[in-house]
Image (spheres, rainbow, N blue to C red):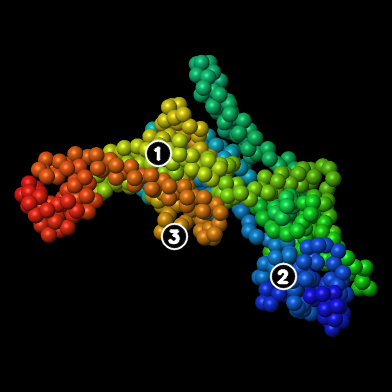
């Protein structure tokens, strides 16, 4: 549309509140709200922003929807943005929950890190760092022996599992500890998670001092590091949360913008206690200098109705877009703490009408909360490469160095395992390794043996490669559980996930992901998985061909003929059962050789 076309269309519009859409054919390019539709749309005849000018040039029409109130226009705009995902709007893309710790409602409760807690469980958190949470949970288990096993592993046991031998569990499953004493230990764990740091820090401190006196300095250093993690566990934002004010529910928002990516971190406090944390990514197209907004409008003078378009204004416009889109479908808090003013008059009127107090604290405890939200937002923004996207999706520190594992065998024969390495998304073939395994027709045990071999080499310093950021297992939940059992048995603390080929689902210890088929971070895992599979199959074929069989003693059957026979029939047993006609169908085998093979086998 040119300027005359915009003015002509605007002249036919009512002077009422509503929502407008710039469209190109059936595609919505931009959605906006207005107190006065005619004035707002007319202002697009002279757009100040180059991005908005490009949008207007592409558009071939403007559609409107009149509303009774400004608040209705605000909420309708949010719904249309979510439905159409217009290219030129800031739009909320997704959210990620933080890990929590749950104690299940069993007679002998289980402790675990999860993002999807059971309804009946006692839940603590959420927390910002999964690695820190896992360190603390491991320390709690070593100190109080609370079980971490699945219900399947717990039930029907007649002897304790390996966790008992490692000092991670007191084995209530076989009543090595009576349930009353076990529940006392669970109560101690609850006290720590409720904020009583000393109940875990004191035993760790004593153990560290004992190790130092015994000159076991490596263990003392390990305990020192763990103690520091435990002591810092309740420190993040704790003081600030305790004195928010009289409001029952307060949301704190932090924003970080880089290029066309923005992240909003939200902290929720209820009755003075931090109860929820999440993080949301938004697209902020065309944001110059770290901004870009849902409310970005072309230049115009203030209309008689008080409706004032505004420029791209970075963090304020992202805040305005997030507040409307997020809270349009959720209950509003009693107060919002923001890093700066959002600058949107319609949003301000909506929040004021709903009785929401909006504050931008400059100092004090509320400011500490805002700083914490900003810190959480900055952890995520601008990391859009496939390795960074994978790390974000899995909530791990990094995914630049990945090792992939697979096993291959023929009905338990010639079992081998592969260990391939990718660095920054590319295969690092100098760091490939392979391992002959004990012949057994059990994929889970084979994977367990392969990962135990890798973990022991790492822990004992016999592997010259750096520790990876992530381990990828070719398989499903069973293979992942076997791999994690091996890691826990050896004590090698590296995140591990599995990728199931049938549905391309990414499986982690506490949830499953079904990412879009075009997601770059899924493609990265697929490359690692496929390369591990290829390398394993290749080595299996080599080992299989090296195995001496009764075919070696058959006159007229040399190495190449034997290889063709095994390739055609798969095993000596199948060669034995083949007919003369089937044998003669193999290249290089005539009638006489076929008869010799049949007679000898």
Image quarter hosting the N terminus: bottom right
**Would you identify the image quadrant in which residue 424 lies?**
top right
Nearer to us: label 2 or label 1? 2
Residue most extreme to the bottom: 12
- Residue receiving disc 3: 503
Dividing the picture into quadrants, the one containing residue 288 is bottom right
Residue sitting at x 33%, y 42%: 539
Front residue of 98/90: it is 90
Q: CA distance from mark 3 to mark 1?
A: 24 Å
Say if 172 sits above or below 588 in the image: above
For image coordinates 61% across by 53% down, the residue present is: 97
Earlier sequence position, callout 3 versus callout 1: 1
State the residue in front, 536 or 135: 536
Q: 97 or 571, which lies in front?
A: 571
Q: Secondary structure at mark 3?
A: loop
Q: Would you name the residue on which mark 1 appears? A: 451
Looking at the rendered image, the disc whose residue lies closer to the viewer, 3 or 2, is 2
Percent coordinates x, y for residue 24 in the rendering:
71, 74
Residue at the spot x=14%, y=45% of the render? Answer: 557
Q: Helix or strand or loop: what does disc 1 sit on? A: helix
* Label 3–label 2 contact, CB within 8 A: no
| Residue bearing mark 2 | 29
Question: Can the viewer see residue 71?
Answer: no
State left or right for residue 137 relative to residue 437: right
Q: Tag 2's secondary structure?
A: strand
Tell me if residue 176 comes above or below residue 541 in the rendering.
above
Q: Is residue 476 visible?
A: yes
Residue sitting farthest toward the left: 599
Bin the neighbour count of mark 3 within 10 Å (Cα to Cα): few under 14, some 14-19, many 20 and up: few
């Amino acid at each position: 549309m040119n300027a005359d076309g915009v003015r002509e269309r605007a002249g036919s519009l009512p002077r009422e509140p509503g929502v407008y859409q710039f469209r190109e054919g059936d595609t919505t390019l931009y959605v906006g709200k207005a107190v006065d539709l005619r004035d707002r749309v007319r202002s697009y005849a002279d757009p100040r922003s180059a991005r908005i000018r490009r949008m207007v040039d592409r558009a071939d029409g403007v559609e409107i929807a009149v509303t009774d109130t400004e608040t209705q226009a605000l909420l309708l705009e949010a719904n249309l943005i979510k439905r159409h995902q217009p290219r030129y709007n800031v739009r909320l893309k997704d959210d990620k929950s933080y890990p929590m710790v749950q104690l299940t409602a069993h007679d002998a409760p289980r402790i675990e890190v999860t993002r999807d807690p059971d309804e009946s469980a006692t839940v603590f958190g959420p927390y910002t760092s999964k690695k820190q949470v896992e360190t603390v949970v491991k320390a709690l288990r070593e100190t109080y022996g609370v079980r971490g096993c699945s219900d399947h592993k717990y039930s029907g046991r007649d002897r304790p599992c390996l966790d008992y031998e490692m000092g991670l569990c007191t084995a209530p499953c076989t009543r090595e500890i009576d349930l009353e004493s076990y529940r006392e230990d669970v109560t101690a764990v609850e006290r720590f998670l409720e904020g009583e740091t000393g109940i875990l820090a004191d035993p760790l401190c004593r153990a560290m001092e004992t190790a130092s006196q015994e000159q076991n300095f490596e263990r003392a250093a390990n305990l020192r590091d763990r103690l520091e993690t435990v002591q810092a566990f309740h420190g993040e934002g704790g003081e600030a949360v305790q004195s928010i004010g009289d409001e029952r529910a307060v949301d704190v928002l932090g924003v970080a913008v880089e290029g066309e990516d923005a992240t909003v971190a939200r902290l929720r406090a209820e009755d003075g206690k931090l109860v929820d944390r999440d993080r949301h990514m938004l697209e902020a197209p065309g944001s110059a200098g770290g901004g870009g907004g849902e409310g970005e409008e072309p230049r115009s003078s203030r209309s008689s109705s008080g409706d004032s378009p505004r420029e791209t204004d970075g963090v304020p416009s992202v805040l305005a877009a997030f507040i409307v889109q997020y809270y349009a479908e959720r209950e509003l808090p009693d107060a919002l703490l923001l890093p700066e003013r959002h600058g949107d008059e319609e949003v301000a009127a909506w929040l004021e009408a709903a009785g929401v107090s909006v504050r931008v604290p400059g100092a004090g405890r509320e400011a500490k909360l805002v700083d914490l939200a900003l810190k959480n937002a900055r952890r995520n923004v601008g990391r859009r490469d496939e390795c960074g996207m994978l790390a974000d999706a899995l909530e791990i520190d990094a995914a630049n160095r990945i090792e992939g594992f697979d096993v291959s065998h023929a009905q338990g024969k010639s079992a081998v395992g592969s260990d391939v390495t990718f660095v920054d998304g590319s295969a690092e073939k100098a760091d490939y390794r392979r391992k002959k395994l004990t012949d057994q027709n059990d994929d889970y045990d084979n994977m367990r043996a392969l990962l135990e071999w890798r973990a022991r080499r790492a822990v004992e310093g016999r592997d010259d490669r750096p520790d990876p950021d992530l381990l990828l297992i070719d398989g499903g939940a069973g293979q992942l559980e076997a791999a994690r059992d091996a890691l826990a048995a050896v004590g090698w603390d590296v995140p591990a996930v599995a990728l199931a080929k049938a549905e391309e689902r990414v499986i982690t210890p506490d949830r499953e992901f079904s990412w879009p088929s075009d997601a770059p971070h899924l493609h990265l895992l697929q490359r690692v998985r496929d390369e591990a599979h290829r390398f394993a199959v290749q080595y299996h074929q080599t080992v299989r061909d090296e195995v001496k069989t009764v075919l070696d003693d058959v006159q007229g059957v040399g190495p190449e003929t034997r290889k063709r026979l095994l390739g055609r029939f798969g095993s000596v047993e199948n060669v034995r059962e083949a007919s003369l006609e089937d044998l003669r169908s193999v290249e290089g085998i005539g009638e006489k050789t076929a008869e010799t093979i049949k007679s000898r086998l």
